Amino acid sequence: MAEKYPFTIEQFYKFVSERKLMAAKCKKCGTMLLPPRPMCTKCFSSDLEWVELKNKGKLLTYTVIHVSSKQFESLIPYAVGIVKLGDGPKLPGMIQDVEPEKISVGMSLEVDFDTTIPSEWPTWPRYFFKPS
Amino acid sequence: MVGKRLATIVSAGLSKFGRREGLYGRELFAEAAKEAYERCPNLIPKKDIKALFVGHMGESYEHQGHTGPTLADWAGLLPVQATRIENACASSGVALRLGTSAVFSGMYDIVMVGGVEKMTHRTTSDVTEFLAMASDFPFEQWHGITFPGLYALMATAHMHRYGTTEEQMAMVAVKNHHNGALNPKAHMQKEVTLEKAMSSRVIAWPLKLYDCSLITDGASCLILTKPELAKKFTDTPVHIIGSGQASDAIGLYEREDITTLKAGKLAGQEAYNKAKVKPQDVNVAEVHDCFTIAEIIAYEDLGFCKPGKGGSLVEEGATKIGGKIPVNTSGGLKSKGHPVGATGVGQAYEIYLQLTGQAEKRQVEGAEIGLSHNVGGSGATATVHIYRRG
Ligand SMILES: [Zn+2]
């Protein structure tokens, strides 16, 4: 699929607005590039393809934010973590639909999307994680 | 046999760190420069100093960019070449390395390196936003991850893998506040109890208020010369014998292992190799304790203990003044304060005092070899410098 789509961060978020998590994959050496990049940083090939990522993963680490910038003040306290998606790449994001006390390292999470946010710089629709 | 002298510190200055109301950053820099000039009466700044390398992280704080020449002006150095360096919280660690390179290369005989940040006039939420600019915007900031949040992610991972405890992190704060209480230039010159640190409000769990460094105003500078010239300016030179710097992905999530800062480890290895010293040869160190977990990870990355043993090292008291390897005798970023652009050279200032016997109540007796470790962002930049008493 999809070589007509540029290998950019903006395109990643356009896919998010279509409720898809996509990464660039190097066709030459197989490296997954997330964030996507126009050139493989391992073998320098530009022969890439977009691949859809697993929408389930395991929580590697997390925190509960109590002091934020103004933009997120209405959400305090909120949890964010780093999730390993299947055997693929890692991605940071918010963890929603769960009490912070019930979050633990290693728990299974799935990806969901908030597509109500307009899709233009610097605001993008957000993917987030929730218990599966 | 220790390594070759790369450059020599003949003088140093540090503004009082703290809430410096009514001042601009450039005025703090003039305060630091004045101290360095007064320590070094044989130096004629306008004639002798040929370049300024200065760390400054954010235009946002004072709505001011182009700070290189501005600071050169306030330090009385116009028209020397002046370069502002931005590597987040490692800005002046990088300035120190570039100044050292400039002298070592033979390009200049004498240069000034320094750093500055004026922060406290802004609200905490503004500062939170400005500091977060040192992290990845589209994947970290955009998902609400703050700067303390990034170190909290490391802390959770370190606790999960190694059993590091919130108490051990709080012990870093207790130690650094004890040291800061002995430092007349520190922002917060007061002791804190373990109980108070543990019960302070949560900023980004598991990090609490007392796990976080301070929002501080301050400036720092050093005067570096070719080693052969140092005698003309001082009887108590401090030689820079090792320097290392490395980079990593800006996004914490992209890194293989987040219980260590790979760039910090690599910068340390480069500096140790160049200096021909080992971790156990270091008598005093200033490490980048922007958060208490960062000091614990720094112990491990710099080889003061094995991976995972950083929590025990502070618990044993090994890093107190009088311990096996005193760390952050100045009070560190935690208590001396963290005016981000000024921090790297501010650390070097403390090592300079220690190795010239001027650290007063904080003096590590007989210190000969010192080390400073300065990290930018969540670890995308790190610099390490190693120093020897002249
Ligand atoms: Zn490749």
Image (spheres, coloured by chain):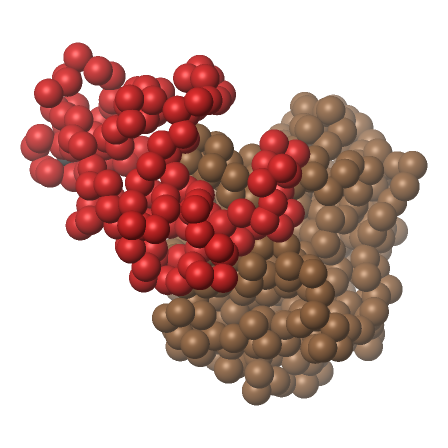
Chain colours: A red, B brown
Give me the residue at 79% from left, 42% from top: B120
B175 versus B267 height, above or below? below
Residue A50 in the figure: left or right of residue B12:
left
Give me the residue at 80% from left, 28% from top: B73
Rendering coords of residue A130 (x, y %)? 37, 46
- Which of the 4 quarters of the picture holds residue B95? top right
- Which of the 4 quarters of the picture holds residue B322? bottom right
Observer-nearest of B308 and B234: B308
Report whether residue B90 is seen. no
Residue B148 in the figure: left or right of residue B177:
left
Rendering coords of residue B237 (x, y %)? 69, 62
Give me the residue at 52% from left, 39% from top: B144
Rendering coords of residue B294 (x, y %)? 53, 62
Report whether residue B144 is seen. yes
Rendering coords of residue B34 (x, y %)? 86, 45
B254 versus B272 height, above or below? above
Q: Residue furthest top?
A: A4
In the rendered image, the quadrant that contains the C terminus of chain B is bottom right
Observer-nearest of B363 and A13: A13
- Which of the 4 quarters of the picture holds residue B219? top right
Q: Quadrant of ligand 1?
A: top left
Q: Residue furthest right?
A: B22
Observer-nearest of B262 and B200: B200
In the rendered image, the quadrant that contains the N terminus of chain B is bottom left
Observer-nearest of B273 and B237: B273
